[in-house]
Image (cartoon, rainbow, N blue to C red):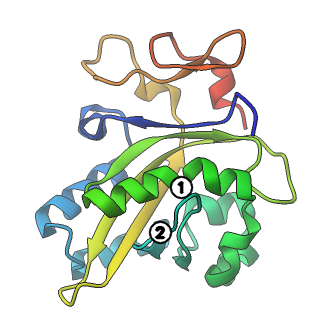
Amino acid sequence: MTKQEFAVRLDIEDINKGGANDLARDLLRSWRDSGGVLCSDLTSFAGHLLIMDGNPCDADTPDILFAGNRSLAAQRFGADWAANPTQARQAFSKDYRRLCSSDYLTVSSTAEPVFGIVSTKSALAHSKREEAYHRLLLPFRTLQGARFTFCFSFELVPGLYRVGDGRSSPLPALDTQGNTSLHKPASLAVFAK
């Protein structure tokens, strides 16, 4: 992992203040309306999601149980990747999985959603392609108690971060040494693919 790689949390309320797309807002609203319980309203979102085991391990991401064919991962890594979700996690590098793991643990332990930005050059085990995206993790459970984490990721959109829009979490930027900063204007490097 390099210093340009980060997974930074943003305020969940940023989603409703223009810091996310319509699908993220709809997902968050459905989670709140259902109290985190799986319901039929969620089926319309399935194609855009990764559905993961709701019981993650320390220093690793949870198993992927389902990969939607319109998810950002399927778009970036191809339909073959999404065709076998139970082995899809192994396509991600250990460094990337470690980078992202703490957010899954937080979702599992607090039963609250996590919203943020991930930037990495090491997402796939066999490639050093730069990736930067928003990620919304939502904890869901069945009435019988089975737990899942829904992962909705979407492209970074610079226009979502207008100055003075009342958001409480600015877009992270990289300083000249490559360190992440939440107190500086966004660097265009964050948006590179």
Q: Position of residue 6 (x, y in %)?
A: 60, 36
Q: Position of residue 128 (x, y in %)?
A: 84, 46
For residue 183, what is the image quadrant?
top left
* Local crowd size for mark 1, using a 10 Å CA cut-off: few (<14), some (14–19), many (≥20): some
Residue 1 horizontal side relative to residue 127, left or right: left
Q: Residue furthest front?
A: 58
Q: Which residue is mark 2?
A: 56
Q: Which quadrant: the N terminus?
A: top right
Q: Position of residue 162 (x, y in %)?
A: 39, 17
What residue appears at the point 31 percent right and 60 percent down from the top-left corner?
109
How many numbered marks, from 0 up?
Answer: 2
What residue appears at the point 24 percent right and 18 percent down from the top-left corner?
166
Residue 82 horizontal side relative to residue 116, left or right: right
For residue 164, what is the image quadrant?
top left
Question: Height in image: 164 above or below 86?
Answer: above
Residue 74 horizontal side relative to residue 44, left or right: right
Q: Residue furthest bottom?
A: 144
Secondary structure under badge 1? helix
**Amino acid type, callout 1:** Ser
First in sequence: mark 1 or mark 2? 2
Q: Position of residue 155 (x, y in %)?
A: 55, 44
Q: Please state which of residues 86 and 55 is positioned toward the viewer in this rendering.
A: 55
Q: Please state which of residues 17 and 93 is positioned toward the viewer in this rendering.
A: 93
Disc sitting over residue 11 in the figure: none
**Tags 1 and 2 touching, CB below 8 Å:** yes
Question: Height in image: 115 above or below 143?
Answer: above
Q: Which residue is mark 1?
A: 101
- Label 1 to label 2: alpha-carbon separation: 8 Å
Residue 192 horizontal side relative to residue 167, left or right: right
**Amino acid type, callout 2:** Pro
Q: Which quadrant: the C terminus?
A: top right
What residue appears at the point 64 percent right and 66 percent down from the top-left corner?
74
